[in-house]
Amino acid sequence: MTNSNFPTSFAEVEGWSNQEGIPVLEGRSKYIQFLTLKAIADSSSLRRELVFKGGNALEFIYLENRATTDLDFTYLSAPGDLDVLKESLGERLSTALQRSDDGVGTVIRLQRIDQQPRGKDRTRVTYKVRIGWAAPGQERQRQLLLDGKPGAQIIDLDISVNENVCAYDETLLRDISHPLKVSTIEDIVAEKLRAILQQPVRRRHRNQDILDIAMIYRNLDPDVALISQFLPAKCQNRDIDPTKSAFRDPEVRERSEFGYDALRDTVRHTFIPFDEAWAAVISLVDSLDIPD
């Protein structure tokens, strides 16, 4: 299954935005995300080494519903020297984006790439990538980018290193000539369940994962046997124990609920109230073959 409801040309943006009931600027950002995915797919090395994952993989590939602001990837190969990898990724992304041409004057350019957390001896890092863009007719923004200067309109990429990708498919998106590696729906669910459990450890709030899993549970048919295999692998070396009782920790629920209602503003189609969404997550967890 591949979702095809996203703009693949600048001419489609306004009509698509009106159809989805969103501002045209948001529709343009979605189009820039598409162009970025196309640029990565057109690069033989990037499409070989990057796996598309997370909320936007869910949105672009499986189940359109919730807008997210960044594109998430995992780097598959052993990273080696992190500074060398950062430079290599930056060069290849910059080249791929410069080669991306939609024929009507849209410009996308790499603005910066930073490692978080910093340090050469880190086990897990994320490269935070910022991409500037200019639409046709935005001459000032376009010239800033062509001159190598920061623009005001951006999208973000996160590229994780040393993350466990349990399964992915080679997926061909509409109007893209080469397939992208995309996490399977079971891998996405397992990753989101891991993030939910890790909230107390990392002192974070993962309300969006509750809504996403509830939507998947209601609308798709993920393989619970695969999720049962993937979840323990995702939790390795992270100070979390993937048990059913762990999901019933009051702090896990409280952190999941914090700020949840604000997700209503990011949803284009279906918003599930928290109590219903949480019940769906627990129902899915109870169906897994993991310890009680």
Image (spheres, rainbow, N blue to C red):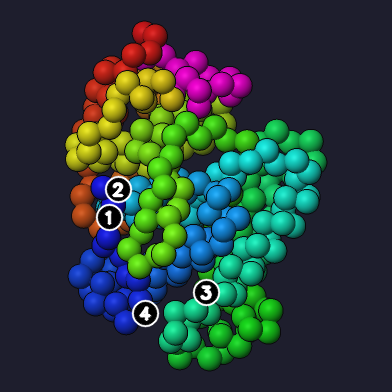
Which secondary structure is most common in the magenta stretch? loop
Residue 100's label in the rendered image is 3
Residue 62's label in the rendered image is 2
Q: Are circles 3 and 2 on residues that touch, CB within 8 Å?
A: no
Residue 256 appears in the figure: no
Lateral position of residue 171 relative to residue 216, left or right: right
Dividing the picture into quadrants, the one containing residue 259 is top left
The magenta region covers: 231-245
Determine the secondary structure under disc 1.
loop
Residue type, mark 4 in image: Phe
- Report the Cα–Cα distance between label 4 and label 2: 23 Å
- Report the Cα–Cα distance between label 3 and label 1: 22 Å
Residue type, mark 2 in image: Tyr
Determine the secondary structure under disc 3.
loop
Q: Earlier in the sequence, mark 2 or mark 1?
A: 1
Which residue is rendered at x = 24% and y = 77% of the image? Answer: 15
Residue 10's label in the rendered image is 4
Residue designated by label 1: 3
Give residue 240's position: percent from left, percent from top: 53, 19
Q: Are circles 2 and 1 on residues that touch, CB within 8 Å?
A: yes
Lateral position of residue 14 relative to residue 138, left or right: left
| Residue 25 higher or lower than 209, as above or below | below
The stretch drawn in magenta includes residue 66 = no
Badge nearest the viewer, 3 or 2:
3
Residue type, mark 3 in image: Ser
